[in-house]
Image (spheres, rainbow, N blue to C red):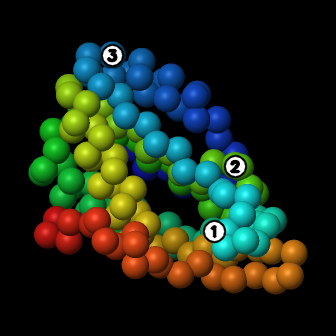
Amino acid sequence: MQILFQRKKFIESDFIKKFSSDNKNSGAIFSFIGKVRPKNQNNNVLSIDIELYEKMAQVQIKKIINKLMKKHLIDDYLVVHRYGRVKPRENIVLIVVASQHRKESFRFGEGLMDWLKVKATFWKKENFANGSEWVNQKEADREFIDFSL
Protein backbone atom coordinates (compact mmCIF):
# COMPACT_ATOMS: atom_id res chain seq x y z
CA MET A 1 0.00 0.00 0.00
CA GLN A 2 1.85 2.94 -1.35
CA ILE A 3 1.40 6.49 -2.63
CA LEU A 4 4.29 7.96 -4.62
CA PHE A 5 4.78 11.46 -6.02
CA GLN A 6 7.61 11.97 -8.47
CA ARG A 7 8.92 14.34 -11.13
CA LYS A 8 10.52 11.72 -13.35
CA LYS A 9 8.73 9.74 -16.05
CA PHE A 10 7.62 6.24 -15.14
CA ILE A 11 7.08 3.07 -17.08
CA GLU A 12 3.76 1.67 -15.96
CA SER A 13 4.61 -1.94 -16.85
CA ASP A 14 7.49 -1.95 -14.35
CA PHE A 15 5.17 -0.96 -11.51
CA ILE A 16 2.35 -3.28 -12.62
CA LYS A 17 4.66 -6.29 -12.99
CA LYS A 18 6.13 -5.84 -9.49
CA PHE A 19 2.71 -5.11 -7.97
CA SER A 20 1.22 -8.21 -9.58
CA SER A 21 4.10 -10.34 -8.35
CA ASP A 22 3.71 -8.93 -4.82
CA ASN A 23 -0.02 -9.75 -4.92
CA LYS A 24 0.09 -13.20 -6.52
CA ASN A 25 -2.66 -14.48 -4.20
CA SER A 26 -5.15 -11.85 -5.34
CA GLY A 27 -7.77 -12.82 -7.89
CA ALA A 28 -7.82 -9.48 -9.70
CA ILE A 29 -5.41 -6.69 -10.53
CA PHE A 30 -6.91 -3.44 -11.80
CA SER A 31 -4.75 -0.72 -13.36
CA PHE A 32 -5.53 2.75 -14.63
CA ILE A 33 -3.09 5.04 -16.44
CA GLY A 34 -3.87 8.72 -16.91
CA LYS A 35 -1.95 10.51 -19.66
CA VAL A 36 -1.59 14.06 -20.92
CA ARG A 37 -3.88 14.59 -23.90
CA PRO A 38 -2.20 16.24 -26.91
CA LYS A 39 -5.27 18.43 -27.49
CA ASN A 40 -7.72 20.17 -25.19
CA GLN A 41 -10.59 22.33 -26.45
CA ASN A 42 -9.07 22.39 -29.97
CA ASN A 43 -5.74 23.68 -28.64
CA ASN A 44 -2.51 21.74 -29.04
CA VAL A 45 -1.10 21.10 -25.58
CA LEU A 46 2.67 21.62 -25.39
CA SER A 47 2.92 20.51 -21.75
CA ILE A 48 1.18 20.58 -18.38
CA ASP A 49 2.77 21.98 -15.24
CA ILE A 50 1.53 20.09 -12.19
CA GLU A 51 2.07 21.53 -8.73
CA LEU A 52 1.18 19.91 -5.45
CA TYR A 53 1.40 20.38 -1.75
CA GLU A 54 2.78 16.91 -1.07
CA LYS A 55 2.01 16.57 2.64
CA MET A 56 -1.57 17.72 2.14
CA ALA A 57 -2.02 15.49 -0.92
CA GLN A 58 -0.76 12.47 1.07
CA VAL A 59 -3.24 13.19 3.87
CA GLN A 60 -6.15 13.75 1.47
CA ILE A 61 -5.47 10.63 -0.58
CA LYS A 62 -5.07 8.48 2.53
CA LYS A 63 -8.42 9.75 3.86
CA ILE A 64 -10.09 8.92 0.56
CA ILE A 65 -8.46 5.48 0.48
CA ASN A 66 -9.52 4.73 4.06
CA LYS A 67 -13.12 5.60 3.21
CA LEU A 68 -13.04 3.53 0.01
CA MET A 69 -11.52 0.57 1.88
CA LYS A 70 -14.58 0.54 4.18
CA LYS A 71 -16.78 0.02 1.09
CA HIS A 72 -14.57 -2.21 -1.04
CA LEU A 73 -12.59 -5.22 0.09
CA ILE A 74 -9.14 -4.88 -1.48
CA ASP A 75 -5.80 -6.53 -0.81
CA ASP A 76 -3.41 -3.76 -1.86
CA TYR A 77 -3.09 -0.52 -3.84
CA LEU A 78 -0.44 1.63 -5.48
CA VAL A 79 -0.77 5.25 -6.59
CA VAL A 80 1.98 6.96 -8.61
CA HIS A 81 1.39 10.62 -9.52
CA ARG A 82 3.78 12.89 -11.36
CA TYR A 83 4.33 16.57 -10.79
CA GLY A 84 6.41 19.20 -12.55
CA ARG A 85 6.35 19.55 -16.34
CA VAL A 86 4.64 16.66 -18.16
CA LYS A 87 4.39 16.47 -21.94
CA PRO A 88 1.60 15.11 -24.17
CA ARG A 89 1.26 11.32 -24.21
CA GLU A 90 3.32 10.98 -21.02
CA ASN A 91 1.87 9.30 -17.96
CA ILE A 92 0.50 11.50 -15.19
CA VAL A 93 -1.02 8.96 -12.84
CA LEU A 94 -1.03 5.21 -12.29
CA ILE A 95 -3.46 3.46 -9.97
CA VAL A 96 -3.10 -0.28 -9.38
CA VAL A 97 -5.45 -2.23 -7.11
CA ALA A 98 -5.41 -5.88 -6.01
CA SER A 99 -8.46 -7.71 -4.70
CA GLN A 100 -9.98 -11.15 -4.64
CA HIS A 101 -12.75 -10.16 -7.07
CA ARG A 102 -12.67 -7.84 -10.10
CA LYS A 103 -15.63 -5.66 -9.11
CA GLU A 104 -13.91 -4.59 -5.89
CA SER A 105 -10.77 -3.58 -7.78
CA PHE A 106 -12.72 -1.73 -10.48
CA ARG A 107 -14.92 0.15 -8.05
CA PHE A 108 -12.08 1.06 -5.71
CA GLY A 109 -9.88 2.26 -8.59
CA GLU A 110 -12.64 4.24 -10.23
CA GLY A 111 -13.68 5.81 -6.94
CA LEU A 112 -10.11 6.76 -6.13
CA MET A 113 -9.56 8.34 -9.55
CA ASP A 114 -12.82 10.29 -9.29
CA TRP A 115 -11.78 11.67 -5.92
CA LEU A 116 -8.26 12.51 -7.13
CA LYS A 117 -9.78 14.66 -9.86
CA VAL A 118 -11.80 16.80 -7.45
CA LYS A 119 -10.29 16.62 -3.96
CA ALA A 120 -6.52 16.15 -4.06
CA THR A 121 -4.39 19.29 -3.90
CA PHE A 122 -2.92 19.27 -7.40
CA TRP A 123 -2.88 22.35 -9.58
CA LYS A 124 -2.50 21.92 -13.33
CA LYS A 125 -1.61 24.56 -15.89
CA GLU A 126 -1.87 23.67 -19.56
CA ASN A 127 0.68 25.30 -21.82
CA PHE A 128 -0.24 26.08 -25.44
CA ALA A 129 1.64 27.82 -28.26
CA ASN A 130 -0.41 30.98 -27.61
CA GLY A 131 -0.33 31.02 -23.78
CA SER A 132 -1.20 29.06 -20.66
CA GLU A 133 -4.35 28.32 -18.73
CA TRP A 134 -4.97 26.86 -15.27
CA VAL A 135 -7.19 23.79 -15.45
CA ASN A 136 -10.46 24.27 -13.60
CA GLN A 137 -12.40 21.48 -11.98
CA LYS A 138 -15.14 20.24 -14.29
CA GLU A 139 -18.69 19.75 -13.08
CA ALA A 140 -18.73 16.48 -15.05
CA ASP A 141 -15.92 15.19 -12.81
CA ARG A 142 -18.10 15.81 -9.74
CA GLU A 143 -21.24 14.15 -11.17
CA PHE A 144 -20.44 10.55 -10.32
CA ILE A 145 -18.73 11.02 -6.97
CA ASP A 146 -20.32 9.45 -3.94
CA PHE A 147 -19.92 12.34 -1.49
CA SER A 148 -21.27 10.16 1.32
CA LEU A 149 -17.86 8.49 1.60
Q: Residue, x 43% and y 66% (percent of image)? A: 117
Report, in whole angstroms, how far the alpha carbon at label 2 lies from the one at label 1. Answer: 13 Å
On screen, residue 97 versus residue 82, left or right, reads: left
Q: Earlier in the sequence, mark 2 or mark 1?
A: 1
User: Looking at the image, is mark 2 or mark 1 nearer the viewer?
Assistant: 2
Q: Name the residue under label 2.
A: 90
Residue 140 against residue 97 in the figure, above or below: below
Q: Are marks 2 and 1 in contact (CB under 8 Å)?
A: no
The secondary element bearing badge 3 is classed as loop
In percent of width and height, residue 143 lies at 31, 71
* Alpha carbons under labels 3 and 1: distance apart: 34 Å
Residue 80 image position (x, y, % from top left): 51, 48
Q: Is mark 2 on a helix, strand or loop?
A: loop
In the rendered structure, the answer to whether residue 128 lies left or right of residue 72 reads right
Label at residue 50:
1
Q: Can residue 15 be seen in this view?
A: yes
Percent from the top left, x then y, of residue 103?
22, 36
Q: Distance between the residues labelled 3 and 2?
A: 28 Å
Figure disc tally: 3
Q: Which amino acid does label 2 sit on?
A: Glu
Q: Is residue 10 above or below residue 84?
A: above
Q: Residue at x 16, y 65 (%)?
A: 149
144, 63: nearer the viewer:
144
Residue 24 - label: 3
Q: Give x and y (percent) for residue 60.
A: 34, 67
Mark 3 or mark 1: name the one nearer the start of the chain: 3
Indicate the amino acid at tag 3: Lys
Tell whether 41 sits left or right of 103: right
Do the residues under discs 3 and 1 have CB atoms within 8 angstroms?
A: no
